[in-house]
Amino acid sequence: MTSQRFSTLRSLTRCAVLRAAEYLMTTRGATTTLDVKQWLRSQGYMALQQDVSGWMSRLADDRYWLFVSNGKFRMYFLPPPAVGETALAYIAPVREN
């Protein structure tokens, strides 16, 4: 039963992590890799902590996300909007890698 369950899970992609993280940052104000991993799993993805952490680190650099670290985990935030823009302006379409 367990192997059948895993075979039906979707593969983790950059795009899935990006969409999950930006959704969580937009709706909650901030997110962690643990939050993203749990949300992805609830959506049917095979999300492992080290994979999510790796994608989040690269995406933070690529997308100019802000983060603070307490030495154990990072809290990620969307950059503040420019004058006259909304936070949603930072959520741009992405191509799947």
Image: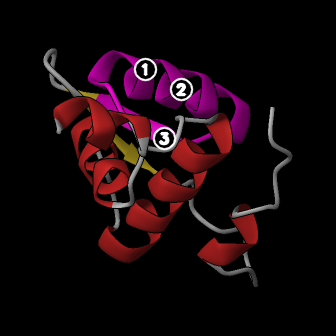
Does the magenta stretch mainly form a helix, a strand or a loop? Answer: helix
Which numbered disc, 1 or 3, marks the residue that appears first in the sequence? 1
Vertical position of residue 51 compared to residue 17: above or below: above
Compute the Cα span from label 2 to label 3: 15 Å
**Where residue 29 appears, x then y in whole percent?**
34, 66
The kind of secondary structure element at disc 2 is: helix
The kind of secondary structure element at disc 3 is: strand
Q: Quadrant of residue 88?
A: bottom right
| Residue that badge 3 annotates | 66
Three-letter amino acid code at the position of disc 2 = Trp
Range of magenta residues: 47-68
Quarter of the image for the C terminus: give it.
top right
Is-magenta flag for residue 56?
Answer: yes
Nearest the eye: 25 or 34: 34
Instruction: Give residue 51's mark.
Output: 1
Nearest the eye: 25 or 36: 36
Left or right of 39? Residue 83 is right
Q: Are marks 2 and 3 in contact (CB under 8 Å)?
A: no
Nearest the eye: 83 or 57: 57
Q: Quadrant of residue 70?
A: top left
Q: Are marks 2 and 1 in contact (CB under 8 Å)?
A: yes
Instruction: Give residue 55's mark.
Output: 2
> Residue at coordinates 57% horizontally, 54% vertically from top-left?
79
Compute the Cα span from label 1 to label 3: 20 Å
Few, some or many residues within 10 Å of mark 3 (<14, 14–19, 20+): some
Is-magenta flag for residue 37?
Answer: no
Three-letter amino acid code at the position of disc 3 = Leu
Vertical position of residue 75 compared to residue 43: above or below: above
